[in-house]
Amino acid sequence: MTALSRERVVAVIGSGAMGAGIAQVAAVAGYTVKLYDSRPEPVAKAMSDIALALNKLVARQRMSPVDAAASLARLQPSLTLDELAATKPGLVVEAIVENLDAKRALFAQLENLVDDDCILATNTSSISVTAIGAQLRVPGRLVGMHFFNPVPLMALVEVVEGLATDSAVAQTVYDTAAAWGKSPVHARSTPGFIVNRVARPYYAEGWRLLAEGAADAATIDAVLREAGGFRMGPFELMDLIGHDVNFAVTQSVFEAYFNDPRFTPSVLQQELVNAGFLGRKTSRGCYRYGDGAVNAPA
Ligand code: NAI
């Protein structure tokens, strides 16, 4: 095992659904975690969501109060990237918006702030790890560390190597994910990697069925869940993921495969994004949430 030493800080950048989950898992595994976001609100929400999640584990006797308190004490917000870099992180996990330019700009900035031995990891769902790292001075230290939602519950982590990724860096990230209690798998950087590539037709055919009026979203979800053996139907799953994220991933895979029609994004989903109906995180997507109305039709 060459997992990152617990003496080293883990920095998580982007404190939305994924960043919060990654920070929780790393802190529970014994690492000091610095959590940063370009806006203060997501950091505050992530801190309180994690406290709530750990309290629930204590209430269910799945974690001791002492371990929960120690995990929370290891988790600290950072107000600036400079402050974060001053803690000399050994691993930065980026979980910001699914956009190549935004990720490149962040890593270009980070490269000048962190030590040379700091691993730069991206939680991108679909964007080429090769492309994200290509403009770095040392592209070898950029690797994909792709978690699944909700991070504390989902075991799989895809450790994605771009063409220039140093395989020792990938192995350290693989071993670190294992030390965090996850089940990592090595993958090469291809559009959507393994899971998001195979999952694209699941969403796409759901949208096509809906557009053709075969059945409503709740019926399609119920059929896939109850007869298909899937844990979630496509629409409830996209509501969990976030339509902004899911749409951006489909667009990215579509473009990466030179507009292969198999991956054509859905105009129905585009309209949800246009409306800001992003799923659970905005209380409305394919379904409405809140006031006890979980899975009510939108
Ligand atoms: P989110 O929208 O919940 O959170 C993104 C956060 O990043 C926001 O709080 C935003 O303020 C912050 N942010 C945006 N630009 C930033 C910047 N330049 N610097 C610092 N913070 C910035 O998104 P979510 O769902 O957490 O996704 C984040 C990443 O993880 C994306 O790349 C996404 O594709 C990937 N991912 C998402 C999954 C999901 O199910 N939602 C699953 C696996 C990966």
Image (tube, helix red, strand yellow):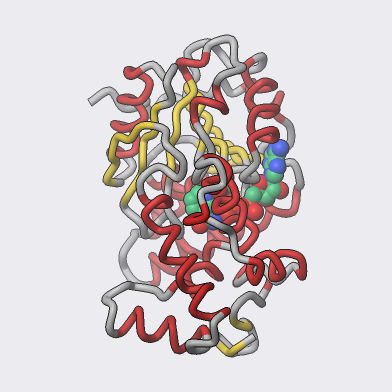
Residue 179 position in % (x across, y down): 29, 38
* Position of the N terminus by quadrant: top left
Q: Residue at x 50, y 19 (%)?
A: 118
Q: Residue at x 54, y 82 (%)?
A: 212
- The quarter of the rendered structure image containing the C terminus is bottom right
Q: Residue at x 40, y 56 (%)?
A: 152
Q: Residue at x 69, y 53 (%)?
A: 42
Compared with 276, 218 (above or below) is below
Looking at the image, how many numbered discs can be counted on the residues?
Answer: 0
- Depth check, front residue: 124 or 112: 124
Residue 100: x %, y % from top left: 64, 35
Q: Compared to 218, does 159 lie above or below?
A: above
Res. 46 in view: no
Which residue ends up furthest to the left in the rendered image? Answer: 1
In the rendered view, tell whether residue 245 sits above or below residue 104: below
Q: Is residue 246 left or right of residue 27?
A: right
